[in-house]
Amino acid sequence: MTSASDIRHGDWVERHLPRSLVPYVRLARLDRPIGTWLLLFPGWWSIALAAEAWPDWRLVALFGIGAVAMRGAGCTLNDIVDRDFDARVARTRTRPIPSGQVTVRQAAIFMALQLAVGAAVLFSLDRAAIALGLAVLLLIGTYPFMKRVTWWPQLFLGLNFNWGALIGWAAATGTLDWPPALLYLGGIFWTLGYDTIYAHQDKEDDARIGVKSSALALGERTRPFLFIVFALAAGLWGAAGSGLGWPFWAALAAVTAHLFWQAAQVRLDEPRDCLAKFRANRHVGWLMLFGIIAAKVA
């Protein structure tokens, strides 16, 4: 089994950007935006769910900038911490740090710059949102180490990636309530599903070098697990939007069908298909967002 390529050589980054910038774009994953979308959508959903009609477009824009910055900072931290592991995995050995394109010191400075952008966004929000943004830093800082100590680093990614559901509601309303909490919990189960699919790309290399993942923990039980966590995600999202009209429920039905399609059709021993199914989760994000907004403005 061969691993899916982590970096597409000859892409727009290499064609159009100065050579000196290319490693930093790779570090921040600006060439692979799916992770930014997956981080951003829970916050956008919550902002839309908190709105009376149309979401606050200022918050939508700020959360977009913040997601790019914080996803980039998180990926840079992950690459610093995992540089020795990455050098031993076929899919990741060409990343900027293990391949020698940037030093650890250069990557750390770049991470600090991205964190500064994220902080500027955070401190422009309501006090409750600021407090929640500061609280998640512990999760962000510990996540890269989880694959060393638990078979479920995907759970910790879910705790991180869906925190925006809490911050988005707090930024829009100044408080917290059950709807964002339910969005958050549903998002954790969603992440458990899509990141387990993603982890199947590296399961042979991970087993060889001693890295833990839900893909290795589950093995042949992965497919029924996917159906369970995706069903739980859809159920919790339905509870979060229980007072909304039919556009939301139509969107949620489409989301549920899409997630079950992933669970049924993913080819877990084919890395490229795992990557394709993982990336398909952007459709989940857009469907949920459009469904919430349509129900609010209908």
Image (cartoon, rainbow, N blue to C red):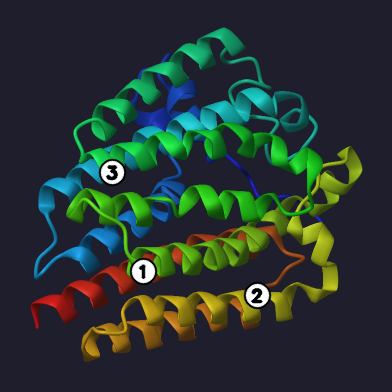
Secondary structure category for the residue under label 3 = helix
Query: In front of the other: label 2 or label 1?
Result: 1
The 10 Å Cα crowd at callout 1, few under 14, some 14 to 19, many 20 or more, is few
Give residue 144's position: percent from left, percent from top.
65, 35
The residue indicated by pointer 2 is 226
Question: Relative to residue 194, is residue 41 drawn left or right?
Answer: left
Residue ID at (12%, 55%): 56
The answer to whether any part of residue 103 appears in the image is no
Nearer the observer, 51 or 45: 51
Height in image: 268 above or below 58?
A: below
- Spot the residue most to the right: 208
* Disc 2 to disc 1, C-alpha distance: 25 Å
Foreground mark, 2 or 3, reads 3
Where's residue 65, x and y in %? Answer: 26, 38
Residue visible at 56% across and 14% down in the picture? 102
Write the residue at 24% across / 68% down.
Answer: 49
**Image quadrant of residue 289?**
bottom left
Identity of the residue drawn at 22% across and 86% down: 247
Which amino acid is tagged 3? Answer: Ala
| Residue type, mark 2 in image | Leu
- Closer to the chain start, of discs 1 and 3, is 3
Tell me where residue 264 appears, x and y as whole percent: 64, 83
Position of residue 76 in the picture relative to residue 49 (left or right): right
User: On the image, numbered disc 1 is attached to which residue?
Assistant: 178
The residue tagged 3 is: 128
Residue 74 visible to the viewer: yes
CB under 8 Å between discs 2 and 3: no
Report crowding for label 3: few under 14, some 14 to 19, many 20 or more residues within 10 A (C-alpha).
Answer: some
Specify the quadrant that holds the N terminus.
Answer: bottom right
Q: Amino acid at mark 1?
A: Trp
Q: Is residue 34 above or below residue 101?
A: below
Residue 230 location, x and y as percent?
56, 76
